[in-house]
Image: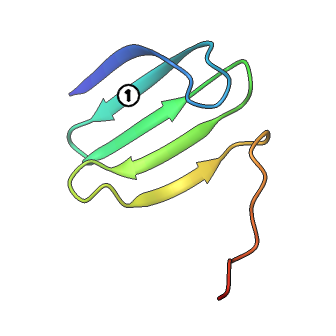
Amino acid sequence: MTTIQQIRCPNCGRPAEREHFASRQVLQTQCPCCDYLLVTCSLTGRVIEAYAPGIGSRPPQWG
């Protein structure tokens, strides 16, 4: 069973969707406006796949 929620995109704030695929134990959040995608395990919260073109990666902080 799949449950779909209408949410705000955590990247751009526009309307987005969060789908819960219970049979696969996966949560998928996606935004058609900014191309944000986050796929996580619904049991552990671990990130399976992520793509957010507007969010830059930071180098590790040492020290």
Q: Is residue 39 left or right of residue 20?
A: right
Give the color scheme: rainbow, by chain, secondary structure or one colour.
Answer: rainbow
Indicate the quadrant containing the N terminus: top left, top right, bottom left or bottom right. Answer: top left
Q: Which residue is mark 1?
A: 19
Q: Is residue 28 left or right of residue 34?
A: left
Residue at coordinates 68% horizontally, 78% vertically from top-left?
61
Q: Residue at x 63, y 13 (%)?
A: 14
Q: How dense is the environment of label 1, judged by Cα within 10 Å: few (below 14), some, or many (20 and up)?
A: some
Q: Amino acid at mark 1?
A: Glu
Q: Position of residue 6 (x, y in %)?
A: 42, 12
Up-down: is 43 above or below 59? above
Instruction: Name the outermost residue toward the front.
Output: 63
Number of marks in the image? 1
Image side of residue 38 versus residue 18, left or right: right
Farthest-out residue, bottom:
63
Q: Compared to 33, does 22 lie above or below?
A: below
Give the residue at x 72% y 18%. 33
Q: Position of residue 40 (x, y in %)?
A: 40, 50
- Residue drawn at (65%, 34%) of the image: 36
For mark 1, give the secondary structure: strand
User: Left or right of 20: which side holds 63?
Assistant: right
* Front position in the image: 39 or 1: 39
Which quarter of the figure is the C terminus placed in?
A: bottom right
- Residue 27 vs 1, above or below: the answer is below
Residue 9 in which image quadrant: top right
